[in-house]
Image: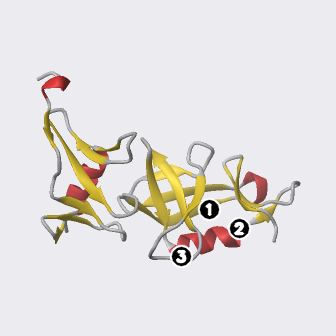
């Protein structure tokens, strides 16, 4: 079957909640391996919509905020030599580096800025509160007076001094 023969479903009854839980027909998907499988074929289109894309079928899904949460931070070294690796709620580890930048957005559910990091394929993860606080503890001020975090040779800016 050619890619153009792929069946397109305008809306699957799958939703990713703000807390990272996946639901099918309103019921939480409790099998972690199934969630990981779905996450491995998740794509974000240019219009911001989310799709599960397999060789035979493509279907749009609903995502309340972003598809993933950062639930763990692993630190090696410190200062400019520091290397931080982040783990998502679907057990994917990646380096917190220039290919995975930090950004701050907003949310109706949360007062103040909400930290997000690019994972891959245009997909983002929101930092769990405990992981964000761990990052804040590692904050330094660079030569330009900006607060940020060194990781894998990259300085992730948190903001200017207040």
- Nearer to us in this view, 13 or 137: 13
Q: Which residue is drawn at 15% across and 69% down?
A: 26
Q: Mark 2 points at which residue?
A: 138
Task: Report the number of discs.
Answer: 3
Q: Residue at x 79, y 63 (%)?
A: 160
Instruction: Assess disc 3: are there few (<14), some (14-19) or many (≥20) residues with their C-alpha within 10 Å of its C-alpha.
Output: few
- Nearer to us in this view, 1 or 84: 1
Mark 1 / mark 3, whichever is N-terminal:
1
Residue 4 image point, x, y percent: 18, 24
Q: Which mark is residue 75?
A: 1
**In whole angstroms, how far apart are the C-alphas of marks 2 and 1?**
10 Å
Instruction: Assess disc 1: are there few (<14), some (14-19) or many (≥20) residues with their C-alpha within 10 Å of its C-alpha.
Output: some
Mark 2 / mark 3, whichever is N-terminal:
3
Q: Label 1's element?
A: strand
Q: Label 2's element?
A: loop
Q: Residue at x 62, y 62 (%)?
A: 75
Cβ–Cβ under 8 Å for marks 2 and 1 = yes
**In whole angstroms, how far apart are the C-alphas of marks 2 and 3?**
13 Å
**In whole angstroms, how far apart are the C-alphas of marks 1 and 3?**
14 Å
Is residue 4 rendered to the left or right of residue 157?
left
């Amino acid at each position: 079957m050619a890619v153009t023969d792929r069946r397109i479903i305008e809306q699957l009854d799958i939703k990713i909640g703000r807390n990272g839980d996946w639901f099918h027909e309103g019921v939480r998907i409790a099998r972690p391996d199934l969630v990981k499988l779905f996450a491995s074929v998740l794509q974000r289109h240019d219009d911001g919509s989310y799709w599960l894309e397999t060789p035979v079928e493509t279907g749009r899904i609903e995502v309340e905020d972003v598809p993933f949460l950062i639930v763990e931070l692993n630190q090696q070294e410190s200062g400019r030599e520091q290397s931080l690796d982040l783990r998502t709620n679907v057990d994917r580890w990646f380096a917190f580096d220039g290919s995975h930048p930090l950004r701050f957005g907003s949310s109706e559910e949360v007062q103040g800025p909400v930290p997000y990091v690019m994972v891959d394929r245009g997909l983002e993860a929101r930092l769990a509160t405990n992981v964000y606080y761990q990052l804040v503890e590692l904050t330094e001020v660079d030569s330009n007076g900006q607060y940020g975090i060194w990781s894998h040779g990259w300085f992730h800016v948190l903001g200017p001094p207040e």
